[in-house]
Image (cartoon, rainbow, N blue to C red):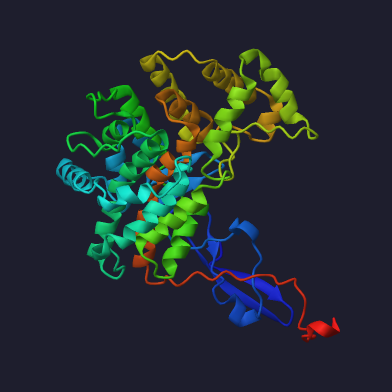
Amino acid sequence: MSDTAKLQVPGKDVEYPVLSGSVGPDVIDIRKLYGQTGMFTYDPGFTSTASCESGLTYIDGDEGVLLHRGYPIGQLAEHSSFMEVSYLLLNGELPSQAELDKFSHTITRHTMLHEQLATFYRGFRRDAHPMAVMCGVVGALSAFYHDSTDITDPQQRMIASHRLIAKMPTIAAMAYKYSVGQPFLYPQNDLSYTGNFLRMTFGVPAEPYEVNPVVEKALDRIFILHADHEQNASTSTVRLAGSSGANPFACIAAGIACLWGPAHGGANEAALNMLREIGRPERIPEYIARAKDKNDPFRLMGFGHRVYKNYDPRATVMQKTVREVFDALKVSDPVFEVALQLEEMALNDPYFIEKKLFPNVDFYSGVILSAIGFPTTMFTALFALARTVGWVAQWNEMISDPEQKIGRPRQLYTGPTQRDYVPVGQR
């Protein structure tokens, strides 16, 4: 491909550099477009616009590829741990055993929340959505940890990153405990990151909590699969907030707010509700017919993806994991059989094949989380917990980028042209 792209505009021809990444499509560098032509590009949803340069995560939606720092997500989910993937995203390389031990120790020692934050929870209504609580509590962290808000100091940025990764499970577990009227449990340092979260969520002070290793592994895997996903809406929100120089806690709170949207973080809850609505495997043909009917508002949730036009590589791991969890917990749920048969029918139906409507990660993760015991209101909070590591890694990368500047999208203005004010008595 040529190293320049030519653009013809009224009155002149201009050329722009073509930049190549290590893998993926080339991009046309249009930073000088407005200065040279007096024009902007128009790209609603930024579907054809690269907003930044990043070395964290690569997605090839057509081929169903997801890489973290070059490592396929399937390999990481199968062989790694969430702490190891967190280290990888933050530091660029997989850790040695000593590095992993030190990192895990650091995260474990940051899991407690300032005691005054317990009273902060009590300011919320008991029926508040966990994401509303998390938005407020994470944003409030900047009022307690002043020693890690100087974004120009790499050491403070790393401390803030460690704190956010470490405290998010505690914040999420406390949001759940508050909603069900149970006492908060403090972190327990001899447990793993995921095991500790399970205990803080489902344990009670009256008796010891025994972590089920199959459930622990399944949830750790879900965390890995949600750790980062390139420049999605919430990650872009974190970067945009960070571009103004906002403190890291405020940036992550902004990401949580964006993730709350049903089109982003709420998809697994919608998929589970759909499977429950279908109810029994014998009703699947009826719902597939409804999905094909353009006049029927019903849509199959958990199928297709904004980016993936092939099988979501994360869904393959989830299908195996859901069977392991159901076997370990001895769950007999028709929803799982509906999920398996619906997937099989959709994958062999010409309509779904033609439209590339393959199952995505949300199709299975909601079923797993429900089997473990999480209410649907916690699903997005768990997503935020896992995605925090991706957010802080992206935020750190952005702050360290010498070409970073405050985000300022342009617009195509279609409102009234200039007009004169008329006093109210003359209108």
Q: Quadrant of residue 393?
A: bottom left
Residue 96 placement, left or right of 304: left
Residue sitting nearer the eye, 113 or 394: 113
**In this view, 113 is above or below 217:** below
Q: Which residue, as the protein is rendered here, is positioned at the far left? A: 98
Task: Tally the numbered discs.
Answer: 0
Residue 98 in view in this figure: yes
Residue 143 is situated, as x and y percent measured from the top left of the image, at 32, 62
**In this view, 152 is above or below 65:** below
Residue at 43%, 48% (x, y): give it.
124
**In this view, 217 is above or below 227:** above
- The quarter in which the N terminus is drawn is bottom right
Residue 184 is situated, as x and y percent measured from the top left of the image, at 30, 38
Residue at 29%, 29% (x, y): give it.
203
Residue 284 placement, left or right of 87: right
Residue 91 in view in this figure: no
Residue sitting nearer the eye, 296 or 1: 296
Q: Which residue, as the protein is rendered here, is positioned at the far right? A: 426
Residue at 41%, 65% (x, y): give it.
242
Residue 327 placement, left or right of 275: left
Residue 8 placement, left or right of 258: right
Residue 189 is situated, as x and y percent measured from the top left of the image, at 18, 38
Residue at 25%, 45% (x, y): give it.
111
Residue 213 is situated, as x and y percent measured from the top left of the image, at 28, 24
Residue sitting nearer the eye, 204 or 359: 204
Q: Quadrant of residue 278?
A: top right
- The quarter in which the C terminus is drawn is bottom right
